[in-house]
Amino acid sequence: MILHPGILALIIGSAIVFVMMLYASIEGIRIISGWDFQSSSEKQLDLERRTYLISSIIKYVLGFEVLSTLLFIYTVDDIHPMFVGAMCATGSLNVNPIGWYALYLKILVFFCASLWIMLNSLDQKAEDFPLIRPKYAALIFITVLIGFDLFFETRYFLGLNPEVITSCCGSLFTDTSSGIAGELSSLSVRPMMWTFYIAVVIFISAALLCMKIQAAFLRYVMSALSIVLFGISIAAMISFISLYIYEMPSHHCPFDIFQKNYHFIGYPIYISLFCGVFFGLLPGFFQPLKKIRSLRDTIMLSEKKWLVMSILFIMIFTAISSWPVVFGSFTMQGY
Amino acid sequence: MDSLIWTENATKIYNPRKPDEIRALEDASLNIEKGEVVVLKGPSGSGKTTLLSLIGCMGRPTSGRIVIDGKDVAKLTERFLTLIRRRTFGFIFQQFNLIRNVSVLENVLLPLYPIEMSFADMRGRGEKILGDLGIRDRMLTKVNKLSGGEQQRVAIARALINGPEIIIADEPTAHLDRKLSTDLLRILKDLNIAGKTIVIATHDPFVYDHPFIKRIVEMRDGRIQDIKLT
Amino acid sequence: MMRHLKILEYALSSLLRRKYRNISLIAVYALTIGILASVLFLTYSLKLEATRILVDAPDIIIQKISAGRHDLIPAIYAEKIRDIPGVGSAEPRYWGYYYDPLSHSNYTLIGIDTDLPGLSLLEGRMPSGAAECAIGAGVGQARIAGTGDTLTLLNSRDTGVEFSVTGTFRSESNILTNDLVVMTKKELLRFFDLPARRSTDIAVTVHNPDEIATIAGKIKQAYPDTRPITKSEIIRTYDAVFNWRSGMMLTIFASALIAFCILAWDKATGISAEEKHEIGILKAIGWDTADILELKFWEGIVISLTSFLLGLLAAFIHVFYLKATILSPVIKGWSVLFPEFRLTPYIDIYQIFVLAFLTIIPYVASTIIPSWKTAITDPENVMRS
């Protein structure tokens, strides 16, 4: 099983990335313990140079994690014919439930690594590297996450047994099944639609408000709204958007939209959602850092960009996912 | 008193506390005003190149202060040092240090690559400066095909492309004949008249005896011995 | 944005200035990618061919199991199976393997009364009487027999039986017919001395493909001593085998990749004095470490992408025009009589993505540290040179 080319690529890639992160963490520890910005000693200059190496490594790691999440979903979808009862990625993941943890971890690593890169870029714009210590401590945390990602991924693929009969999205994402998937699928369509579109409007309004008013409280609200919007969007995907894309009132699967017969629409939908949520998180996340004098101006300048990007991506996400709802020939009367 | 460059007890020690320790510069305190032409004079090993590179934000001093246009650069990170260096200084090196097998224009425009400026704007600026120095017609020639004098002008053009306030020249006449040396000094003089501050490190009497030099800083064994007005 | 483009432009110019060093690197890189890509293309293409062929295969094949092994099945089972609602047809099949000591290969002998679907003869006609057969191209080649010749096979009593070859199959159907010897049903039963009213297996077609699993279940219930094998199970098995083979080959060639990465590291670390000086000049005139790192990044991307495209192209030509001469023996398996056939060129974005993952990531990883070491060159050194 493990000799499937996609699986090999994922595991080898993850292993290489983990080793790189371990190296980065060791350098990070060296930096945390030896850093003295006031000194001009050779050692300090050497540490400053090493910060560039670590930044390089993390940028590559993030790039890898994004691609590997996409590859993971595609691979898991590609291997589904090998399992009885599996018709899409959901089926493959259900064969060995640890696969779900691998997926969640990848999503978490995406957000954490992106946040780190943003943090790093802000820190580098300040004249005195004010965030050196917290930054590299966070790095160690990300390394641990990536280690777990590798572990779960490998355990998942190693534990795949074609003899196991699995249940697919049809039984997981159905009104009558128990668990979160079932709960989400059984949400009534009309109220869910209202909730989703109202949430999007509130989100965009909050972002526009943040651009006009400098209040700290607004920025925290913005970040909280991002997280809430993420949850509502996923729920919306499962409860009604997927129905319109598949043109079937009982097909709630959030993964089938990655397949060729749906024109790979899943990729732009989820990518725009993730990016929109990520940029929406930033203002509140970095608000406390405005206390640091050398960062204040940089953050304030960047904030506007983040908010604009966030609005843009969420609008793209809403547009793409609403297209079949508004213009599709499928209607959900009586639901 | 318009102090542009100010150093206080600037010290640079390579490999400190090791057997191969070199005390390249010690307790250098210097004050250069806007529009001045200053020569750092001394034999090789006197510390003049080190002082020049510290002033030019090429490296950080081991101790002491260096203030350029009101900004203390001694403790800046590499990123900010580079920003200041790019904005404020133009360098003329001993060996021209042009990139071989690359055209004149491209060599001159290299300092502009890392900044947000379109190709068209860059090219326009480059052509103008090359025109001012009389080598526009050799714009697309590879630099290794140029004569010594032409290469010298390319090096100067590159130093000027960012519109710097301060020109730093390290032994600029070391590999030039008398005629080219004269040309060089004439160009530097014109630049000074145009408002640029010039700092030259040299042990060539042809340079430090030249009338347009305002001050000579004598250095020996890593220390400033004497500062004379001419 | 402009800044990135300008640094990219400089990266291209820098790579062109060091043509010879970079060409050798690209050549080795492209070769490594070409080998890995060939493996992927070949297995994927074969997998596609196999699944395409299976389209015409019966939906369910019923085999009898005795003491855990495949046994001849009573032909009468077919009658009861036909009565199950949803079943389109249930026909007993008569076929077997024949080991030919002359050519040391296995033939498949099949007894039919009607034309085989999906197969066409190159010349001649299908056998209709005693001692007649039609053969596949592989058999014809191995025994140097064509239409109008005789083919002698040893029957179950070790007696030579002479068959008159009435037809040969076309080469397009090679993958199905290469090792085939077709004769009448009566002839086959006699040749293998098969007991009356027993067949090798029963081929079942089903009206609604969604019902296959249900009907297979019903058949198993009706005849517990049988094993129904569905088409999807066969496809899954093929999938697994092909994946396994290609994965195995990739693992083997991983050593080539590792060797390449060591080379890449070495090249990147062994930066020439001239290049080091050039970086020093750039830093002296206003480029900072991040700019140099970006320069190195672009250089790496250009080299990777160029090698990747060249490697893909080479693999494409190797597999689809040169018939994968280097790799086929391992991938295709143990059968001696492997058919000559043209693989349909087919490339899948997923495959390309996987290949990029397997080749570009290790390369990038092995050049990060050397690139950084170059990028931290001290501009001060330029003053002293």
Image (spheres, rainbow, N blue to C red):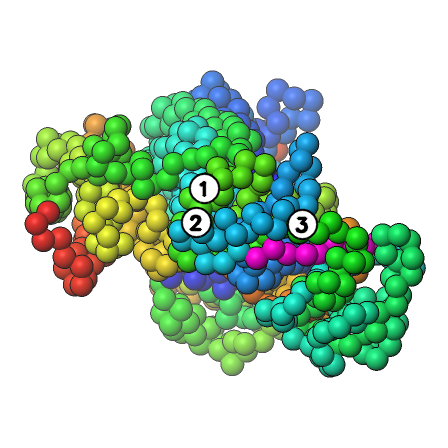
Q: Earlier in the sequence, mark 2 or mark 3?
A: 2
Return the chain for callout 1: C
Tell me how far mark 2 sits from mark 3, CA to CA: 21 Å
Callouts 3 and 1 in the same chain: yes
Tell me how far mark 3 sits from mark 1, CA to CA: 21 Å
Question: The magenta stretch spans which residues?
Answer: C91-99
Tell me how far mark 2 sits from mark 1, CA to CA: 8 Å
- Above or below, C117 against A196 in this view is below
Label 1: element kind: helix
- Front residue of B148/A221: it is A221
Judged left or right of residue C126, residue B78 is left
For the N terminus of chain C, the quadrant is bottom left
Question: In this view, which residue lies farthest toward the top?
Answer: A33
Question: In this view, which residue lies farthest toward the front?
Answer: C196
Query: Alpha-carbon neighbours of circle 3 within 10 Å: few (<14), some, or many (≥20)?
Result: some
- C97 falls in the magenta region: yes
Q: Earlier in the sequence, mark 3 or mark 1?
A: 3
Label 3: element kind: strand
- B44 falls in the magenta region: no
Labelled disc at residue C218: 1
Residue C93: x and y in percent read 64, 56
Q: Which of the two marks, 3 or 1, is nearer to us in this view?
A: 3
- Amino acid type indicated by mark 1: Lys
Label 2 close to label 1 by CB (< 8 Å): yes
